[in-house]
Image (cartoon, rainbow, N blue to C red):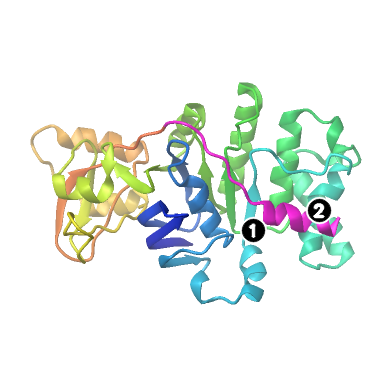
């Protein structure tokens, strides 16, 4: 559903992403963690086609973004719903009007727009609030309006940036339950977060977890590709040795998020040293795994989480406000 292969991106000479490879299957929910400046926002912007990579390949819902004309990008975005940390709602408009905007931007007929918006509000439990002005709603309900707006176009993929960042613990839990329900309908989700409560909830519901530091997927506290070479150990994974990497690392591993049943197939028998029990625990906590095309060896990966980042997609907000 979402594939990034050896993706590089820099801004003003500063590298934001360093050879990131990440594959997310249809129906998966993935938590993207890491400190501010690690590259989470950049990664989400690349998926949304708000930025273009300098190197590497990105595909979303089967479409290779680098091969698209600018005029085709809106069609790719029909597959994406985006939930912003600061909601990006129009406070002087009603709940229904805000939710309708994404469908209106797509040029859908008015009758269909209204039907979709009302269905989205029903999905998040806000049908009775359709006529209320957004500015009269508390933060938890405003975040639900933002989720409904993202769902209005019925996207197969949902991107969330710090969705609980402005919510109290009770409202945050409500939102997470809502997201889990959305995932249960088959929606693929990528959620950038620094909140340990979100991570704990996600791991308890079978969501996956990946971490970025200084633009790289990390394993055991160091860049994942180095960990694959050094044999850093805590969580069992499979690694493939492939094409050369720049300067000091001379091997490459492709990270892929695996489903639990895939991991069962790849694990093999009892190691006899107690590590089997550890890996059973790892399987339950949804750790990130790697899979290879050639020779393999076993190393480990420990996912870290730290401070927040913000997703700045002002181009979408601008589109909505201009349309309004």
Magenta stretch: residue 303 in it? no
Q: Is residue 209 left or right of residue 163?
A: left
Q: Which residues are magenta?
A: 306-324
Q: Is residue 278 left or right of residue 92?
A: left
- Please name whichever residue, 118 or 310, is drawn nearer the observer in this view of the structure: 310
Query: Where is residue 19, by image quadrant?
Result: bottom left
From the top left corner, tell me how far across and down residue 36 is, in percent: 47, 37
Which residue does the image show at 16% across and 35% down from the upper left?
A: 275
From the top left corner, tell me how far across and down residue 226 is, in percent: 21, 48
Query: Where is residue 84, by image quadrant?
Result: top right
From the top left corner, tell me how far across and down residue 256 is, in percent: 34, 55
| Residue extending furthest toward the right | 131
User: Is residue 268 at all visible to an observer of this figure?
Assistant: no
Asked which secondary structure carries label 2, the reply is helix
Which residue does the image show at 46% across and 33% down from the upper left?
A: 199
Q: Residues within 10 Å of mark 1 (few under 14, many from 20)?
A: some
Report, in whole angstroms, how far the alpha carbon at label 1 lies from the one at label 2.
21 Å
Q: Which residue is mark 2?
A: 321
Q: Nearer the viewer, mark 1 or mark 2?
A: 2
The C terminus sits in image quarter: bottom right
User: Is residue 309 at all visible to an observer of this figure?
Assistant: yes
Q: Which residue is mark 1?
A: 155
């Amino acid at each position: 559903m979402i594939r990034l292969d050896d993706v590089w991106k820099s801004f003003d000479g500063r590298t934001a992403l360093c050879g990131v490879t990440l594959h997310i299957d249809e129906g998966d929910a993935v938590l993207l963690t890491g400190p501010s400046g690690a590259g989470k926002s950049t990664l989400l912007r690349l998926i949304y086609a708000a930025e273009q990579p300098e190197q590497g390949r990105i595909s979303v819902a089967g479409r290779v973004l680098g091969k698209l004309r600018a005029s085709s990008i809106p069609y790719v975005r029909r597959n994406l719903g985006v939930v912003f940390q600061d909601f990006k709602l129009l406070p002087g408009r009603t709940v229904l009007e805000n939710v309708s905007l994404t469908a209106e931007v797509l040029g859908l007929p008015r009758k269909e727009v209204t039907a979709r918006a009302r269905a989205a509000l029903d999905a998040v439990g806000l049908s009775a609030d359709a006529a209320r002005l957004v500015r009269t709603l508390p933060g938890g309900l405003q975040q639900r309006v933002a989720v409904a707006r993202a769902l209005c176009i019925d996207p197969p993929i949902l991107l969330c940036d710090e969705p609980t960042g402005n919510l109290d613990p009770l409202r945050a839990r409500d939102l997470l339950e809502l997201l889990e329900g959305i995932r249960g309908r088959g929606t693929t989700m990528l959620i950038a977060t620094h909140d340990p409560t979100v991570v704990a909830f996600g791991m308890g519901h079978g969501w996956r977890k990946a971490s970025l530091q200084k633009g790289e997927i990390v394993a055991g506290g160091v860049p994942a590709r180095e960990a694959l070479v050094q044999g850093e150990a805590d969580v069992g994974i499979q690694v493939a040795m492939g094409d050369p990497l720049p300067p000091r690392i001379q091997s490459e591993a492709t990270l892929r998020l695996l489903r639990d049943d895939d991991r069962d197939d790849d694990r093999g028998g009892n190691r006899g040293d107690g590590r089997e029990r550890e890996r059973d625990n790892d399987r339950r906590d949804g750790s990130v795994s790697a899979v290879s095309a050639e020779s393999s060896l076993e190393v480990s990966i420990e996912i870290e989480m730290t401070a927040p980042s913000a997703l700045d997609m002002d181009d979408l907000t601008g589109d909505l406000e201009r349309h309004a």
